Image (tube, grey):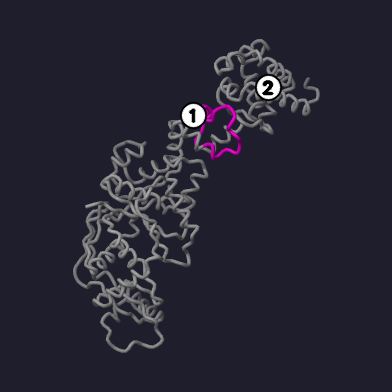
Amino acid sequence: MTVRTRFAPSPTGYLHIGGARTALFSWLYARKHGGQFILRIEDTDRERSTEESVQVILDGMAWLGLDYDEGPFFQTERMDRYREVIQQLLDSGQAYYCYCSKEELDAMREEQMARKEKPRYDGRYRDFTGTPPEGVQPVIRFKNPQEGVIEIDDMVKGRVVIDNRELDDLIIARADGTPTYNLTVVVDDLDMGITHVIRGDDHLNNTPRQINILRALGAEPPKYAHIPMILGEDGKRLSKRHGAVNVMQYKEDGYLPEALVNYLVRLGWSHGDKEIFSREEMIELFSLEGVNRAASTFNPSKLLWLNEQYIKTMDADELADRLREKLDVDTADSPPLARVVDALRDRSKTLNDMAVSARWFYRDPDSYDEKAAKRQFKAETAETLRRFAEAVDKVEPWEAETLHRFVADFAAEQGLKMGQVGMPLRVALTGGTSSPDIGLTLELIGREAVRRRLLRAVSWMEKKRPTAR
């Protein structure tokens, strides 16, 4: 048997953390077993489904590297097939027309609640053979078995048993003829040969109904794995305020897809104490048996930590390609961006952090941090920086180690401490006080740019403090 899994989002919003994790688990299971992963867009909610949301889902899948073998399939393109199956169920006596009006259904529920019963359709049109009432456009309901139980050998939850008497006859086609979710998902899983349905446990209540429809169609149901939900750190269902934003927002915020995927795989699954996994290790080690039965807690700090680890260890050239998208400066001239990446990776949590610091290797600062300038640009600093700018021509070779010693020697010659030269240099060269080792900073910026920036800072100080000289 070829394993076939699927991810079936509704394009009524963005691809969020919960959906991305479901997609990842389905993708990993298929890849581990040499199977196929199918993408299906469940877009029958025409009022809320948008092409923009479809694109956001596709973009998110691509960014996370969750490639699919078939699809995307769209339910709106399969309406004829759904109608065919609905008619098949009607013809076989396993579905029927229900003429209950909205008022009739409301009254039914009120009576049941008054008797402290669970509100549900009572099957009054299940075996109806009379004359249909006028003025009511009927829905079509599935004739659910009234005896026996449904046993689900869930690959995460374990054995789940549901008595058929607990289930009412669900609607499979609305009054306007459009099919409902529980019908379309069954037909799609059947036609697409899905062998394993991996989805959130909020769908567990639908599973016995879907199994009964599948059996009514003469099919054996797939295996099911219902993954527990994700909670925020306050123990409540994950929402935007917890970080459940569009997956692509993490790209905008400077996260690496490898870090997010690594975080998602550990969100409810574990393999010993191992925290960091390569894509190949995830595929090799993943199992549904390793998925926790309890809900997981989304921890933004842990995600940020993982992102830092990937930034520290990723190949410099590859990281430079990612960083280049974040920069609004031309990096064609020296220094090589990969060298800048190596200089900044240990002090950057996100690509956005790195981009802020990387810009000044290629572009002169157009302003100076107000607090830093006030503290470092003293009355005597202009003359110190002027002398340093004149002395840089003597430095050979122009390398970090030599430059670091040069700064120290220059400070000693001026009767100053290293910090009294190094910190004003940083502000003059970068606009702020945060940069790598001063020798490496000087090397990467380059001799000509260093001289230019220092003289510009001197000019700025002289304008601010006419008596500085």
Residue tagged 1? 346
368 with respect to 132 (left or right): right
Residue 451 - label: 2
Badge 1: how crowded within 10 Å, few (<14), some, or many (20+)? Answer: some
387 with respect to 258 (left or right): right
Q: Nearer the viewer, mark 2 or mark 1?
A: 2
Reply above or below: 389 against 266: above
Residue 370 visible in the snapshot: no
Where's residue 448, x and y in %?
Answer: 66, 22
Residue at image coords 69%, 33%: 367
Tell me the element at label 1.
Answer: helix
The answer for how far apart the CA atoms under marks 2 and 1 are is 27 Å
The amino acid type of the residue labelled 2 equals Arg
The amino acid type of the residue labelled 1 equals Asp
Tell me the element at label 2.
Answer: helix
Which segment did they paint magenta? 323-349
As rendered, which of 153 and 297 lies closer to the eye? Answer: 153
246 in the magenta segment = no
Where's residue 38, x and y in %?
Answer: 34, 54
Looking at marks 2 and 1 on the same chain, the residue that comes earlier in the sequence is marked by: 1
